[in-house]
Image (spheres, grey):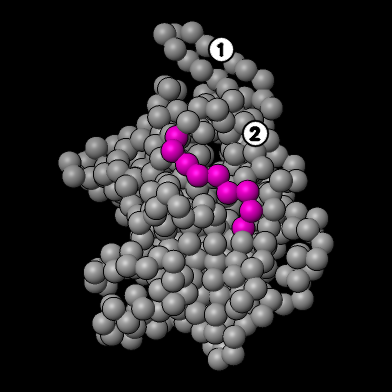
Amino acid sequence: MQTLTTRCCVAGGGPAGMMLGFLLARAGLDVVVLEKHADFLRDFRGDTIHPSTLELMHELGLLHEFLQRPHQEVRQLTAQIGDAHVILADFSSVPTVCKFIAFMPQWDFLNFLADRGRRYDGFHLMMETEATDLIEDDGRVVGVRAVTPRGPVEVRADLVIGADGRHSTVRERAGLKVNDLGAPMDVLWMRISQRPEDESEAFGHVEAGRFFIMLDRGDYWQCAFVIPKGTADVLRTKDISEFCGTIRELSPWLGERVDELKSWEDVKLLSVAVDRLERWYRPGLLCIGDAAHAMSPVGGVGINLAVQDAVAAANILVEPLRSRALAIDHLARVQARREWPTRVTQRIQVIVQNNVIKRVLTGTERPRPPMAMKLLDWFPALRGIPARMIGVGVRPEHIRTGEDVRRNGTMTRSSAH
């Protein structure tokens, strides 16, 4: 068995794990990031990069380079509720450099962070390496066991980060208790081709018992069809043509393009979960991102909460890791910093799930915009409130760690933002 030693081992190469790995290496620390897949190319992962994350790229001096990657910019979120067209959010007034949501394939986002991470000597990304168990010594986590195509490996570390998603092996092996907040819906994801004459905006269509969302991905629409929780198997017993007909009713302008869905193999299920850990840490171990709190797709804020966790963790943990003085109090500080914004965001998501989405999915009458949405129409300035909640969120983080670059035996250090 191969054994590696590092200052920090991050299990999971998603947005939280990759951002934290990059920031720790940027600060001059040795870090190993484990990603179980051979690449990041997986459809229908969260693709929304919100203004708060773009602001972090600006603080890192990477924004211009980042926006060279293929992406679409959305400055307003709109919806059709029954026969009413509503602008739900307008990002023109958010207090950030970028006043839009960038829709970028998650693999491009992760590859960008990986490429920038490799510029630092301390960054080590191990693909096709899946964390399977924790290594403990007298109640303290001191590393992880992992499997690779070349055999098993042990990674010994001062700190293990669980960033391996909502089905986290790390948190399960650590015995951390999860509180399930519940979700009344699941989501079916699919692709439908786009034409030049199509309107370019994020769009939702709500009718009695049906909730359909379309996201502009440049040459195709990434579509989400919201269904009651646990009904996907029943729906799949029916012919796909019936499902296509429902989509055509909601968006008739798609026409024959809906028939691109040839079978249920072209429709992917996202089982929605909203949960969070009671405690995010143990001695030698910290969970962040979806491993600490699975988010609802409401608002599309999951990536951005995960990235904010990573930035807060780096801000708090860099110096204790550098001086090898890491204590459990430092891990508690990360949870204390990020738990409140997580609770607030999840509370809003649960309210929307139970009072809007659930009513739509179980309703029989054509829906009408609630009074709060009518106010957005009557007073356009109010559209900045949901835009700020979605685009910036509660307690946005900022880069507080400096850059420590070692190349050819020399060292330079920049000041933190």
Which kind of residue does numbered mark 1 sit on? Thr
**Residue 50 at x, y = what percent?**
59, 47
- Name the residue tied to disc 1: 412
- Magenta-drawn segment: 69-77
Which kind of residue does numbered mark 2 sit on? Ile
**Residue 278 at x, y = what percent?**
59, 65
Asked whether the residues under the numbered discs 2 and 1 touch, taking CB atoms below 8 Å apart as contact, a structural biologist would say no
> Who's the residue at 27% across and 72% down the image?
264
> Who's the residue at 58% across and 34% down the image?
57
> Who's the residue at 75% across and 42% down the image?
95
**Relative height, residue 21 to residue 87 (above, below):** above
| 10 Å crowding of disc 1: few (<14), some (14-19), many (20+) | few
Which mark, by number, is residue 399? 2
Q: Quadrant of the N terminus?
A: top left
Residue at the far left in the pictured view: 150
Instruction: For marks 2 and 1, give the CA distance.
Output: 18 Å
**Relative height, residue 385 to residue 404 (above, below):** below
Give the quadrant of residue 315: top right
